[in-house]
Image (cartoon, rainbow, N blue to C red):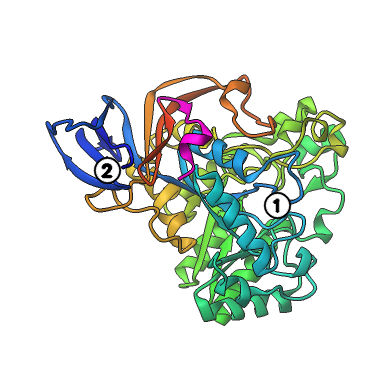
Amino acid sequence: MSESFLIRGARPEGTDAVDVRLQDGIIAEIGTGLSAGGATVIDADGLVALPGLVDLHTHLREPGYEASETVLSGSRAGAAGGFTALFAMPNTSPVADTAGVVEQELALGEAAGYVTVQPIGAVTVGQKGERLAELGAMARSRAQVRVFSDDGFCVWDPLIMRRALEYVKAFDGAVAQHAQDPRLTEGAQMNEGTVSAELGLTGWPAVAEESIIARDVLLAEHVGSRLHVCHLSTAGSVDIIRWAKKRGVNVTAEVTPHHLLLTEDLARGYDARFKVNPPLRREEDVLAVREGLADGTIDIVATDHAPHPAEAKACEWSAAANGMVGLESALRVVQQSMVDTGLLDWADVARVLSRTPARIGRLAGHGRPIAVGEPAHLTLHDPAAGGVFTPEDLHGRSANSPYLGRELPGRVAWTFHGGVATLRDGVLTAAEEIVR
Protein backbone atom coordinates (compact mmCIF):
# COMPACT_ATOMS: atom_id res chain seq x y z
CA MET A 1 0.00 0.00 0.00
CA SER A 2 1.31 3.46 -0.89
CA GLU A 3 2.05 6.02 1.82
CA SER A 4 -0.88 8.22 2.82
CA PHE A 5 -0.59 11.83 3.93
CA LEU A 6 -2.68 14.19 6.01
CA ILE A 7 -1.90 17.81 5.11
CA ARG A 8 -3.03 19.98 8.01
CA GLY A 9 -4.03 23.59 7.53
CA ALA A 10 -3.08 24.21 3.89
CA ARG A 11 -4.80 27.01 1.96
CA PRO A 12 -6.09 25.67 -1.39
CA GLU A 13 -5.26 28.33 -3.99
CA GLY A 14 -4.95 30.86 -1.16
CA THR A 15 -8.39 30.28 0.38
CA ASP A 16 -9.23 29.29 3.96
CA ALA A 17 -7.13 26.62 5.64
CA VAL A 18 -8.34 23.01 5.50
CA ASP A 19 -6.99 19.51 6.02
CA VAL A 20 -6.40 17.37 2.92
CA ARG A 21 -5.91 13.60 2.98
CA LEU A 22 -4.02 11.91 0.13
CA GLN A 23 -4.48 8.18 -0.18
CA ASP A 24 -4.06 5.61 -2.96
CA GLY A 25 -3.08 8.31 -5.45
CA ILE A 26 -6.15 10.48 -5.03
CA ILE A 27 -7.44 13.27 -2.81
CA ALA A 28 -9.46 11.12 -0.43
CA GLU A 29 -10.84 13.67 2.03
CA ILE A 30 -11.00 17.42 2.63
CA GLY A 31 -12.23 19.01 5.84
CA THR A 32 -11.23 20.44 9.20
CA GLY A 33 -9.99 18.51 12.20
CA LEU A 34 -9.45 15.31 10.24
CA SER A 35 -7.89 12.45 12.22
CA ALA A 36 -4.49 11.17 11.15
CA GLY A 37 -5.60 7.56 10.91
CA GLY A 38 -2.06 6.30 10.38
CA ALA A 39 -1.19 8.84 7.69
CA THR A 40 2.02 10.86 7.62
CA VAL A 41 1.02 14.26 9.02
CA ILE A 42 2.31 17.44 7.37
CA ASP A 43 2.04 20.75 9.21
CA ALA A 44 1.04 23.03 6.33
CA ASP A 45 0.20 26.13 8.38
CA GLY A 46 0.77 29.13 6.08
CA LEU A 47 1.34 26.99 2.99
CA VAL A 48 -0.63 27.54 -0.23
CA ALA A 49 -1.85 24.35 -1.87
CA LEU A 50 -1.86 24.43 -5.66
CA PRO A 51 -2.76 21.79 -8.21
CA GLY A 52 0.53 20.28 -9.41
CA LEU A 53 2.26 22.69 -11.77
CA VAL A 54 2.33 21.89 -15.50
CA ASP A 55 5.05 23.22 -17.82
CA LEU A 56 4.08 23.28 -21.49
CA HIS A 57 7.62 24.13 -22.62
CA THR A 58 10.59 22.16 -21.24
CA HIS A 59 13.80 21.04 -22.90
CA LEU A 60 14.84 17.70 -21.41
CA ARG A 61 17.60 17.12 -24.03
CA GLU A 62 17.34 13.31 -24.04
CA PRO A 63 17.99 11.53 -26.34
CA GLY A 64 21.20 13.01 -27.73
CA TYR A 65 22.25 15.83 -25.41
CA GLU A 66 22.57 14.09 -22.06
CA ALA A 67 25.53 16.29 -21.08
CA SER A 68 23.01 19.11 -20.65
CA GLU A 69 20.06 17.24 -19.15
CA THR A 70 18.33 13.87 -19.05
CA VAL A 71 14.70 13.04 -18.58
CA LEU A 72 15.55 11.90 -15.06
CA SER A 73 17.55 14.99 -14.07
CA GLY A 74 15.00 17.33 -15.65
CA SER A 75 12.19 15.50 -13.90
CA ARG A 76 13.97 16.00 -10.57
CA ALA A 77 14.39 19.71 -11.33
CA GLY A 78 10.68 19.88 -12.14
CA ALA A 79 9.64 18.19 -8.91
CA ALA A 80 11.89 20.58 -6.95
CA GLY A 81 10.03 23.48 -8.56
CA GLY A 82 6.57 22.11 -7.78
CA PHE A 83 5.87 20.63 -11.23
CA THR A 84 4.04 17.36 -11.68
CA ALA A 85 3.96 17.38 -15.51
CA LEU A 86 6.48 18.51 -18.12
CA PHE A 87 5.91 18.77 -21.86
CA ALA A 88 9.21 17.80 -23.52
CA MET A 89 10.23 19.80 -26.59
CA PRO A 90 11.36 17.81 -29.64
CA ASN A 91 14.82 19.30 -30.31
CA THR A 92 16.61 16.11 -29.31
CA SER A 93 18.92 13.89 -31.38
CA PRO A 94 17.26 12.21 -33.12
CA VAL A 95 14.54 14.84 -33.33
CA ALA A 96 11.22 13.75 -31.87
CA ASP A 97 9.52 13.63 -35.26
CA THR A 98 8.41 9.98 -35.25
CA ALA A 99 6.23 7.76 -33.10
CA GLY A 100 9.28 5.80 -32.01
CA VAL A 101 11.12 8.76 -30.51
CA VAL A 102 8.13 10.22 -28.66
CA GLU A 103 7.34 6.79 -27.23
CA GLN A 104 10.97 6.52 -26.07
CA GLU A 105 10.65 9.88 -24.26
CA LEU A 106 7.39 8.79 -22.67
CA ALA A 107 9.00 5.58 -21.40
CA LEU A 108 11.97 7.49 -19.96
CA GLY A 109 9.59 9.75 -18.07
CA GLU A 110 7.64 6.79 -16.71
CA ALA A 111 10.87 5.15 -15.55
CA ALA A 112 12.03 8.33 -13.79
CA GLY A 113 8.70 8.69 -11.99
CA TYR A 114 9.10 12.17 -10.54
CA VAL A 115 6.68 13.85 -12.97
CA THR A 116 4.48 13.01 -15.93
CA VAL A 117 6.57 13.57 -19.08
CA GLN A 118 4.43 14.34 -22.12
CA PRO A 119 6.34 14.53 -25.42
CA ILE A 120 5.79 17.32 -27.93
CA GLY A 121 6.31 16.25 -31.54
CA ALA A 122 8.15 18.19 -34.21
CA VAL A 123 6.07 19.88 -36.89
CA THR A 124 8.55 19.17 -39.68
CA VAL A 125 11.03 16.38 -40.36
CA GLY A 126 14.23 17.13 -38.47
CA GLN A 127 12.80 20.56 -37.59
CA LYS A 128 14.09 21.68 -40.99
CA GLY A 129 10.85 23.35 -42.08
CA GLU A 130 10.70 21.50 -45.41
CA ARG A 131 8.00 18.82 -45.03
CA LEU A 132 5.58 17.73 -42.34
CA ALA A 133 6.67 15.14 -39.82
CA GLU A 134 4.60 12.07 -38.92
CA LEU A 135 1.98 14.10 -37.05
CA GLY A 136 -0.77 11.51 -37.27
CA ALA A 137 1.49 8.63 -36.25
CA MET A 138 2.71 10.56 -33.20
CA ALA A 139 -0.88 11.42 -32.29
CA ARG A 140 -1.91 7.76 -32.55
CA SER A 141 1.16 6.48 -30.68
CA ARG A 142 1.21 5.49 -27.03
CA ALA A 143 2.46 9.02 -26.30
CA GLN A 144 -0.83 10.47 -27.64
CA VAL A 145 0.93 13.66 -28.79
CA ARG A 146 -1.39 16.65 -29.11
CA VAL A 147 1.09 19.55 -29.29
CA PHE A 148 3.57 19.95 -32.13
CA SER A 149 6.40 22.47 -32.36
CA ASP A 150 9.69 23.12 -34.13
CA ASP A 151 10.72 25.21 -31.11
CA GLY A 152 14.17 26.65 -31.58
CA PHE A 153 13.16 27.13 -35.21
CA CYS A 154 10.25 29.02 -36.69
CA VAL A 155 7.93 27.24 -39.09
CA TRP A 156 8.68 30.04 -41.51
CA ASP A 157 7.02 28.70 -44.68
CA PRO A 158 3.37 29.86 -44.60
CA LEU A 159 2.22 26.90 -46.70
CA ILE A 160 3.86 24.38 -44.35
CA MET A 161 2.33 26.22 -41.38
CA ARG A 162 -1.11 26.16 -43.00
CA ARG A 163 -0.86 22.44 -43.76
CA ALA A 164 0.23 21.69 -40.19
CA LEU A 165 -2.72 23.62 -38.76
CA GLU A 166 -5.07 21.77 -41.11
CA TYR A 167 -3.60 18.36 -40.27
CA VAL A 168 -3.78 18.64 -36.47
CA LYS A 169 -7.46 19.59 -36.58
CA ALA A 170 -8.29 15.93 -37.19
CA PHE A 171 -7.22 14.95 -33.64
CA ASP A 172 -7.71 18.25 -31.77
CA GLY A 173 -4.01 19.04 -31.86
CA ALA A 174 -2.24 22.39 -31.61
CA VAL A 175 0.76 23.87 -33.39
CA ALA A 176 3.07 25.72 -31.00
CA GLN A 177 5.02 28.31 -32.93
CA HIS A 178 8.46 29.72 -32.17
CA ALA A 179 7.72 33.14 -33.64
CA GLN A 180 10.95 34.38 -35.18
CA ASP A 181 11.41 35.56 -38.73
CA PRO A 182 14.80 34.04 -39.60
CA ARG A 183 15.74 36.72 -42.13
CA LEU A 184 15.08 39.56 -39.69
CA THR A 185 17.21 37.94 -36.97
CA GLU A 186 20.32 36.79 -38.83
CA GLY A 187 23.25 37.08 -36.45
CA ALA A 188 21.05 38.53 -33.71
CA GLN A 189 22.58 38.62 -30.24
CA MET A 190 20.10 40.55 -28.08
CA ASN A 191 17.05 42.80 -28.28
CA GLU A 192 17.37 45.47 -30.94
CA GLY A 193 17.36 48.93 -29.38
CA THR A 194 19.41 51.48 -27.54
CA VAL A 195 21.30 48.95 -25.44
CA SER A 196 22.29 46.78 -28.42
CA ALA A 197 23.52 49.90 -30.22
CA GLU A 198 25.59 50.94 -27.21
CA LEU A 199 27.12 47.46 -26.86
CA GLY A 200 27.67 46.97 -30.59
CA LEU A 201 25.68 43.72 -30.66
CA THR A 202 23.44 42.76 -33.57
CA GLY A 203 19.81 43.33 -32.60
CA TRP A 204 16.80 40.97 -32.57
CA PRO A 205 13.92 43.31 -33.50
CA ALA A 206 10.50 42.98 -31.93
CA VAL A 207 8.91 42.95 -35.39
CA ALA A 208 10.60 39.61 -36.13
CA GLU A 209 8.35 38.06 -33.48
CA GLU A 210 5.27 40.16 -34.08
CA SER A 211 5.13 39.65 -37.86
CA ILE A 212 5.09 35.84 -37.52
CA ILE A 213 2.41 35.96 -34.82
CA ALA A 214 0.27 38.25 -37.00
CA ARG A 215 0.62 35.90 -39.97
CA ASP A 216 -0.13 32.80 -37.93
CA VAL A 217 -3.24 34.07 -36.16
CA LEU A 218 -4.66 34.87 -39.59
CA LEU A 219 -3.77 31.37 -40.80
CA ALA A 220 -5.34 29.83 -37.69
CA GLU A 221 -8.49 31.88 -38.25
CA HIS A 222 -8.63 30.82 -41.90
CA VAL A 223 -8.16 27.13 -41.08
CA GLY A 224 -10.16 27.12 -37.85
CA SER A 225 -7.41 25.34 -35.94
CA ARG A 226 -5.59 25.68 -32.62
CA LEU A 227 -2.47 27.87 -32.55
CA HIS A 228 -0.24 28.28 -29.51
CA VAL A 229 2.40 31.03 -29.40
CA CYS A 230 5.57 30.12 -27.53
CA HIS A 231 7.50 32.51 -25.25
CA LEU A 232 5.78 35.76 -26.29
CA SER A 233 8.05 38.66 -25.30
CA THR A 234 7.02 42.06 -26.68
CA ALA A 235 4.32 44.64 -26.08
CA GLY A 236 3.37 44.46 -29.75
CA SER A 237 2.89 40.70 -29.53
CA VAL A 238 0.49 41.18 -26.61
CA ASP A 239 -1.52 43.63 -28.72
CA ILE A 240 -1.73 41.17 -31.62
CA ILE A 241 -2.92 38.30 -29.42
CA ARG A 242 -5.47 40.59 -27.76
CA TRP A 243 -6.75 41.61 -31.21
CA ALA A 244 -6.89 37.99 -32.40
CA LYS A 245 -8.85 36.83 -29.37
CA LYS A 246 -11.39 39.62 -29.88
CA ARG A 247 -11.87 38.23 -33.41
CA GLY A 248 -12.50 34.77 -31.98
CA VAL A 249 -9.28 33.19 -33.23
CA ASN A 250 -8.47 29.96 -31.39
CA VAL A 251 -5.06 31.13 -30.19
CA THR A 252 -3.30 30.73 -26.85
CA ALA A 253 -0.01 32.23 -25.74
CA GLU A 254 2.66 31.73 -23.11
CA VAL A 255 5.18 33.98 -21.39
CA THR A 256 8.30 32.79 -19.59
CA PRO A 257 9.18 33.75 -16.01
CA HIS A 258 12.32 35.51 -17.23
CA HIS A 259 10.37 37.74 -19.59
CA LEU A 260 8.15 38.70 -16.65
CA LEU A 261 11.09 39.89 -14.58
CA LEU A 262 14.37 40.49 -16.42
CA THR A 263 15.30 43.19 -18.95
CA GLU A 264 17.84 43.74 -21.72
CA ASP A 265 19.99 45.87 -19.39
CA LEU A 266 21.40 42.63 -17.96
CA ALA A 267 23.31 42.16 -21.23
CA ARG A 268 25.55 45.09 -20.32
CA GLY A 269 27.81 42.80 -18.30
CA TYR A 270 28.18 40.34 -21.22
CA ASP A 271 27.22 37.53 -18.82
CA ALA A 272 25.94 34.82 -21.17
CA ARG A 273 23.54 33.49 -18.52
CA PHE A 274 21.31 36.31 -19.74
CA LYS A 275 21.49 35.33 -23.42
CA VAL A 276 18.22 33.75 -24.49
CA ASN A 277 15.91 33.43 -27.50
CA PRO A 278 13.72 35.43 -27.71
CA PRO A 279 16.00 37.91 -25.97
CA LEU A 280 15.34 39.82 -22.80
CA ARG A 281 13.40 42.91 -23.83
CA ARG A 282 12.81 46.49 -22.64
CA GLU A 283 11.22 47.42 -19.32
CA GLU A 284 8.16 48.52 -21.32
CA ASP A 285 7.82 45.01 -22.72
CA VAL A 286 8.12 43.45 -19.27
CA LEU A 287 5.30 45.64 -17.99
CA ALA A 288 3.19 44.84 -21.08
CA VAL A 289 3.53 41.07 -20.77
CA ARG A 290 2.69 41.29 -17.06
CA GLU A 291 -0.46 43.21 -17.95
CA GLY A 292 -1.26 40.69 -20.70
CA LEU A 293 -0.94 37.80 -18.27
CA ALA A 294 -3.04 39.59 -15.67
CA ASP A 295 -5.91 40.36 -18.05
CA GLY A 296 -5.94 36.91 -19.66
CA THR A 297 -4.54 37.89 -23.05
CA ILE A 298 -1.57 35.64 -22.28
CA ASP A 299 -2.91 32.29 -21.13
CA ILE A 300 -0.06 30.62 -19.29
CA VAL A 301 3.44 30.81 -17.88
CA ALA A 302 5.87 28.25 -19.35
CA THR A 303 9.51 28.00 -18.35
CA ASP A 304 11.33 27.31 -21.65
CA HIS A 305 13.77 25.46 -19.36
CA ALA A 306 16.87 25.23 -21.57
CA PRO A 307 19.87 23.59 -19.90
CA HIS A 308 23.39 23.89 -21.30
CA PRO A 309 26.76 22.60 -20.07
CA ALA A 310 29.08 25.16 -18.46
CA GLU A 311 31.31 25.52 -21.52
CA ALA A 312 28.35 26.64 -23.66
CA LYS A 313 27.92 29.71 -21.44
CA ALA A 314 31.46 30.33 -20.12
CA CYS A 315 32.63 32.00 -23.30
CA GLU A 316 32.28 35.26 -25.20
CA TRP A 317 28.70 36.45 -25.65
CA SER A 318 28.55 35.94 -29.43
CA ALA A 319 29.64 32.28 -29.15
CA ALA A 320 27.42 31.40 -26.19
CA ALA A 321 24.31 29.26 -26.47
CA ASN A 322 20.85 30.73 -25.98
CA GLY A 323 18.82 29.56 -23.02
CA MET A 324 18.22 29.50 -19.27
CA VAL A 325 17.19 26.82 -16.79
CA GLY A 326 13.97 27.74 -15.06
CA LEU A 327 12.06 24.86 -13.47
CA GLU A 328 13.22 25.34 -9.88
CA SER A 329 12.73 29.12 -9.94
CA ALA A 330 9.50 29.52 -11.93
CA LEU A 331 6.95 29.67 -9.10
CA ARG A 332 9.15 32.00 -7.07
CA VAL A 333 9.58 34.38 -10.02
CA VAL A 334 5.84 34.37 -10.70
CA GLN A 335 5.25 35.20 -7.04
CA GLN A 336 7.68 38.12 -7.22
CA SER A 337 6.53 39.55 -10.56
CA MET A 338 2.79 38.85 -10.43
CA VAL A 339 1.52 37.93 -6.94
CA ASP A 340 3.56 40.25 -4.76
CA THR A 341 2.76 43.09 -7.19
CA GLY A 342 -0.98 42.43 -6.82
CA LEU A 343 -1.48 41.50 -10.47
CA LEU A 344 -2.49 37.86 -9.77
CA ASP A 345 -3.82 35.96 -6.78
CA TRP A 346 -3.08 32.32 -6.00
CA ALA A 347 -6.17 31.10 -7.85
CA ASP A 348 -4.79 32.87 -10.94
CA VAL A 349 -1.43 31.18 -10.39
CA ALA A 350 -3.19 27.81 -10.37
CA ARG A 351 -4.84 28.78 -13.65
CA VAL A 352 -1.72 29.96 -15.52
CA LEU A 353 0.71 27.36 -14.13
CA SER A 354 -1.53 24.29 -13.94
CA ARG A 355 -5.10 24.24 -15.23
CA THR A 356 -4.68 26.07 -18.53
CA PRO A 357 -1.38 24.48 -19.65
CA ALA A 358 -2.89 21.05 -18.97
CA ARG A 359 -5.96 22.01 -20.99
CA ILE A 360 -3.92 23.36 -23.92
CA GLY A 361 -1.84 20.18 -23.95
CA ARG A 362 -4.93 17.95 -23.52
CA LEU A 363 -3.19 16.24 -20.60
CA ALA A 364 -5.80 14.30 -18.68
CA GLY A 365 -5.55 14.05 -14.91
CA HIS A 366 -3.46 17.21 -14.46
CA GLY A 367 -4.56 20.76 -13.74
CA ARG A 368 -7.54 19.37 -11.86
CA PRO A 369 -9.25 21.11 -8.93
CA ILE A 370 -8.24 20.34 -5.36
CA ALA A 371 -11.30 18.23 -4.65
CA VAL A 372 -12.20 14.79 -3.32
CA GLY A 373 -11.70 12.06 -5.90
CA GLU A 374 -9.22 14.03 -8.01
CA PRO A 375 -5.69 12.74 -8.76
CA ALA A 376 -3.26 13.66 -5.98
CA HIS A 377 -1.02 15.95 -8.04
CA LEU A 378 -0.37 18.73 -5.56
CA THR A 379 2.16 21.46 -4.74
CA LEU A 380 2.60 23.07 -1.32
CA HIS A 381 4.26 26.50 -1.51
CA ASP A 382 5.41 28.74 1.34
CA PRO A 383 4.99 32.34 0.12
CA ALA A 384 6.45 33.78 3.33
CA ALA A 385 9.79 32.02 2.87
CA GLY A 386 12.47 33.00 0.39
CA GLY A 387 16.10 33.92 0.12
CA VAL A 388 19.01 34.12 -2.27
CA PHE A 389 18.79 31.67 -5.16
CA THR A 390 21.94 29.53 -5.10
CA PRO A 391 23.43 26.56 -7.02
CA GLU A 392 22.08 24.33 -4.23
CA ASP A 393 18.58 25.23 -5.46
CA LEU A 394 19.32 23.59 -8.83
CA HIS A 395 18.76 19.86 -9.32
CA GLY A 396 19.34 19.32 -13.05
CA ARG A 397 22.62 18.75 -14.87
CA SER A 398 23.14 22.39 -15.85
CA ALA A 399 23.52 25.57 -13.84
CA ASN A 400 22.78 28.29 -16.41
CA SER A 401 20.23 30.08 -14.22
CA PRO A 402 19.87 33.87 -14.52
CA TYR A 403 18.75 34.05 -10.87
CA LEU A 404 21.90 32.84 -9.11
CA GLY A 405 22.73 35.36 -6.39
CA ARG A 406 19.33 37.02 -6.69
CA GLU A 407 16.82 37.29 -3.84
CA LEU A 408 13.57 35.47 -4.69
CA PRO A 409 10.48 35.11 -2.51
CA GLY A 410 8.74 31.87 -1.62
CA ARG A 411 9.80 28.24 -1.32
CA VAL A 412 8.28 25.08 -2.74
CA ALA A 413 7.95 22.80 0.28
CA TRP A 414 6.20 19.64 -0.96
CA THR A 415 5.36 18.17 -4.38
CA PHE A 416 3.04 15.18 -4.77
CA HIS A 417 2.86 13.27 -8.06
CA GLY A 418 0.04 10.77 -8.00
CA GLY A 419 0.07 10.81 -4.22
CA VAL A 420 3.82 10.11 -4.03
CA ALA A 421 5.88 12.81 -2.30
CA THR A 422 8.58 13.64 -4.83
CA LEU A 423 9.70 16.65 -2.75
CA ARG A 424 9.52 16.43 1.06
CA ASP A 425 9.92 19.63 3.02
CA GLY A 426 12.20 21.04 0.35
CA VAL A 427 14.26 17.86 -0.13
CA LEU A 428 13.94 15.66 -3.22
CA THR A 429 12.94 12.09 -2.51
CA ALA A 430 15.49 9.43 -3.44
CA ALA A 431 14.99 7.87 -6.87
CA GLU A 432 14.54 4.36 -5.49
CA GLU A 433 11.58 5.59 -3.44
CA ILE A 434 9.94 7.22 -6.48
CA VAL A 435 9.89 4.55 -9.17
CA ARG A 436 6.66 2.66 -8.83
Q: Which residues are magenta?
A: 425-436
Determine which quarter of the picture holds residue 198: top right
x and y percent of residue 131 in the render? 77, 76
Point out the frontmost of discs 1 and 2.
Answer: 2
Residue placed at 64% from the left, 37% from the top?
Answer: 325
The answer to whether marks 1 and 2 mark residues whose Cβ atoms lie closer than 8 Å is no
Q: Is residue 333 left or right of residue 210?
A: left
| Residue 433 is inside the magenta segment | yes
Q: Nearer the viewer, residue 239 or 24?
A: 24
Residue placed at 28% from the left, 53% from the top?
Answer: 374
* Residue at which label 2 appears: 23
Spatial distance from mark 1 to mark 2, Cα to Cα?
49 Å
* Count of labels in the image: 2
**Quadrant where the C terminus is found in the figure:** top left
x and y percent of residue 73 in the render? 62, 38
x and y percent of residue 41 in the render? 25, 27
**Quadrant where the N terminus is found in the figure:** top left
Residue placed at 35% from the left, 41% from the top?
Answer: 50
